[in-house]
């Protein structure tokens, strides 16, 4: 797997990011399709001083460049000390010309255009990385699918999921975001101002998040706008978006409820076995898909955590690293627990599927036993009927009734008597088989013996206990003595 980009196993693999970068280096001429100008794109610029925490511009083409520049200038006047934060909910070929009027950095035009296109036109996921390894202030980019329950995306804003949304699909758990961020050199009118661009999709959920959640939560964070190097800033941005939108605990909790429902269906047996097993197979496939996105999150945080060693090795004595690295460690621990939980749920689903097959085989065996019992009842009567049907025998028909009824009663009594006889025979043959093997007290540790420098109680000893079980003579051991074999084993282990 390439470190440049990540593809979930179930997704179509396209070209590597290195190839995309070489391809994007060939600049395209500024000509657009006639329909591109009819697709408006909402650009929201964060502003701490305004009531909604942002100012909005609906752009329809390159002719909106003066309005865009005026909007950026207005937000800079209102928030002179804050970094520039933008949220963009669409893609068109003219978008890069609009953004390039105010924001440009080394290699940023090609990378930003490729990032924007990948967010809306592909399923690729990008790990957080610097666009250029040779420039200290080169922008960083990443594309991530934030994961949460689809219901939570709607409940957060006081809405209910529409009936048209397929809530069991893994695609409904995904919230696709792209981020372009640069510490210095991006804003053409003041190179010292950090710039972050958040690319979202024009869906109802993402529009609610941008309008009512993202800007508000980021500006409420006390650490927003702190002076950091670019590695710490990217880690903080990736972490805040993750904690704001992703919750693997919700996902595992819902998977547990699905497992409980599958267990209840299996116990009641109200649906056909094929339907139940296919449903559980779909649940297992869904867990596999979820774990692929969990793996991307874990690997992204591990890549960011590697930067910690490079940044903290030169710290002066007495100076502590940025608190963001401690949060990254906590998130990695939580992701590990979520992975273990999903693995356990997957195994329990597989065990339940195997149980369904075992129950089905047992049911077929019981049905076969019932048919055998029916055959046992009527086989003697059928034999008698064949005898009475011989033309050379002149028995009266009434005599058949006198013979068949007692034979039928004997057959009915024979079935339970035969089963009980088989059970008694097996119990008598295997009476020496013990349900539990014999154990001796000297083979195990008694209460309190694991405490260092512990001594045996004066009134109870191993010899007394052994005599109680074996009928031997009870001999009290002196205080402070221990079993020799145990002491030797302890010495060897030390």
Image (cartoon, grey):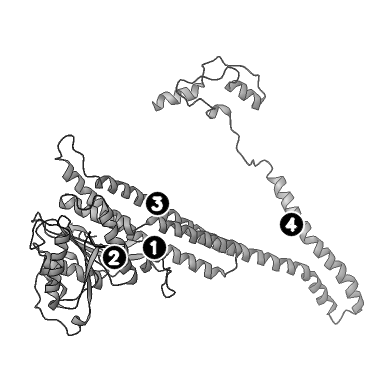
Q: Give the residue displayed 28% in from the left and 54% down from the top.
A: 220
Q: Is residue 306 above or below residue 366?
A: above
Mark pair 4, 1: CA separation: 63 Å
Query: Which residue is under mark 4?
Result: 419
Q: Is residue 9 visible?
A: no
Q: Which sits earlier in the primary sequence, circle 4 or circle 3?
A: 3
Q: Which mark is residue 156?
A: 1
Quarter of the image containing the N terminus? bottom left
Q: Residues within 10 Å of mark 3 (few under 14, many from 20)?
A: few
Mark 4 vs mark 3, CA separation in Å: 47 Å
Residue nearer the viewer, 264 or 61: 61
Judged by depth in the image, the label closer to the viewer, 4 or 2, is 2
Location of the C terminus (image quadrant): top left
What's the distance in space between the residues labelled 4 and 2, CA to CA?
A: 72 Å
Q: Earlier in the sequence, mark 2 or mark 1?
A: 1
Q: Mark 2 or 3 closer to N-term?
A: 2
Q: What residue is disc 2 on?
A: 210
Where residue 19 sits, quadrant-wise, is bottom left
Front-most of residues 431 and 335: 335
Residue 235 in picture, x, y percent from top left: 22, 53
Q: Could you tell whether 264 is left or right of 420 in the image?
A: left
Q: Residues within 10 Å of mark 1 (few under 14, many from 20)?
A: some
Pick the front one: 99 or 107: 99
Viewer-nearest residue: 249 or 485: 249
Residue 337 locus on image (x, y percent)? 38, 50
């Amino acid at each position: 797997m390439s470190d440049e980009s990540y593809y979930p196993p179930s997704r179509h693999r396209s070209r590597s990011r290195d190839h995309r970068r070489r391809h994007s280096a060939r600049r395209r001429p500024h000509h657009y399709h006639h329909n591109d100008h009819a697709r408006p794109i909402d650009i929201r610029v964060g502003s701490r001083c305004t009531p909604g925490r942002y100012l909005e511009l609906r752009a329809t083409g390159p002719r909106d460049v003066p309005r865009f520049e005026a909007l950026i200038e207005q937000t800079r006047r209102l928030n002179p000390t804050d970094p520039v934060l933008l949220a963009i909910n669409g893609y068109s070929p003219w978008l890069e010309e609009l953004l390039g009027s105010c924001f440009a950095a080394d290699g940023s035009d090609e990378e930003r255009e490729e990032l924007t296109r990948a967010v809306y036109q592909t399923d690729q996921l990008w790990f957080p990385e610097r666009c250029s390894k040779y420039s200290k202030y080169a922008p960083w980019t990443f594309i991530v699918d934030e994961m949460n329950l689809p219901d939570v995306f709607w409940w957060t804003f006081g809405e209910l999921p529409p009936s048209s949304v397929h809530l069991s699909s893994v695609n409904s758990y995904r919230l696709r975001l792209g981020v372009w961020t640069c510490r210095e050199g991006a804003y053409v009118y003041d190179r010292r101002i950090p710039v972050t661009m958040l690319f979202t999709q024009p869906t109802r959920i993402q529009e609610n998040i941008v309008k009512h959640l993202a800007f508000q939560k980021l500006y409420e964070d006390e650490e927003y706008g702190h002076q950091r190097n670019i590695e710490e800033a990217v880690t903080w941005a990736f972490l805040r978006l993750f904690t704001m939108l992703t919750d693997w605990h919700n996902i595992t909790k819902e998977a547990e409820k699905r497992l409980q429902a599958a267990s209840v269906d299996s116990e009641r047996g109200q649906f056909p076995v094929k339907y139940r097993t296919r449903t559980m197979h779909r649940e297992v496939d869904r867990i596999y898909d979820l774990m692929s996105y969990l793996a991307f999150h874990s690997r992204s945080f591990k890549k960011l955590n590697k930067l910690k060693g490079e940044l903290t090795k030169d710290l002066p004595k007495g100076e502590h690293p940025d608190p963001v690295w401690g949060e990254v460690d906590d998130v990695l621990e939580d992701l590990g627990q979520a992975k273990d939980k999903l693995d356990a749920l997957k195994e329990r689903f597989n065990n339940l599927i195997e149980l369904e097959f075992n129950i089905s085989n047992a049911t077929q065996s019981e049905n076969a036993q019932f048919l055998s019992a029916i055959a046992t009842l009527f086989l003697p009567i059928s034999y008698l009927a064949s005898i009475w049907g011989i033309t050379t025998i002149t028995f009266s028909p009434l005599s058949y009734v006198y013979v068949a009824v007692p034979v039928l009663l004997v057959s009915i009594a024979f079935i339970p008597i035969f089963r009980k006889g088989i059970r008694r025979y097996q119990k008598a043959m295997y009476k020496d088989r013990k349900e539990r093997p014999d154990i001796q007290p000297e083979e195990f540790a008694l209460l309190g013996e694991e405490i260092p420098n512990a001594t045996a109680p004066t009134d109870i000893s191993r010899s007394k206990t052994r005599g109680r079980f074996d009928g031997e003579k009870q001999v009290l051991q002196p205080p402070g003595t221990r079993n020799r074999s145990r002491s030797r084993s302890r010495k060897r282990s030390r």
